[in-house]
Image (tube, rainbow, N blue to C red):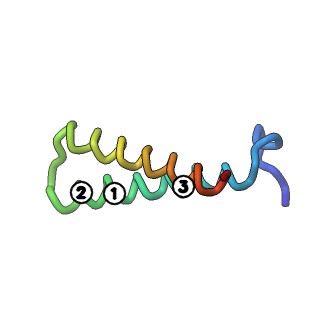
Amino acid sequence: MVPLPGTEEWDPRLLTVVILGVLVVMLLVAGRWRRRGRSEPMRIARYLVVGFLGLLLVAAVVFH
């Protein structure tokens, strides 16, 4: 496997967790926009915070 530029020192598990977390947050935000037609900034911020906390939880489980 060829490492991405700048990721030679990254743990592949960490890279996987980061990518999955970003995809989940993007899907959540996109789903809210499509369903509501518009999004309040506080609603977006809340989902970003929840997604970030979820990402931390997954990272803690993976690296435990």
List the residue tagged with mark 2.
32
Q: Residues within 10 Å of mark 3 (few under 14, many from 20)?
A: some
Give above or below for 42 relative to 20: above
| x and y, in percent, of residue 45 in the image | 29, 39
The mark nearer the N terminus, 1 or 3, is 1
List the residue tagged with mark 3.
58
Q: Residue at x 36, y 43 (%)?
A: 48
* Amino acid type shown at disc 2: Arg
- On the rendered structure, is 57 left or right of 63? left
Which quarter of the rendered picture does the N terminus lie within? bottom right
In depth, the one of 42 and 54 nearer the eye is 54
Mark identifier at residue 28: 1
Tell me the CA gap for discs 3 and 2. 23 Å
Mark identifier at residue 11: none
Q: Residue at x 35, y 47 (%)?
A: 50
Q: Residue at x 70, y 55 (%)?
A: 13
Q: On the image, which quarter does residue 62 sit in? A: bottom right
The reply to whether discs 1 and 2 touch (Cβ–Cβ < 8 Å) is yes
The mark nearer the N terminus, 3 or 2, is 2
| x and y, in percent, of residue 2 in the image | 84, 55
| x and y, in percent, of residue 5 in the image | 77, 42
Tell me the CA gap for discs 1 and 3. 17 Å
Give above or below for 5 relative to 22: above
Label 3: element kind: helix
* Amino acid type shown at disc 1: Leu
Indicate which label's residue lies in the foreground, 3 or 2: 3
Q: Residues within 10 Å of mark 2 (few under 14, many from 20)?
A: some
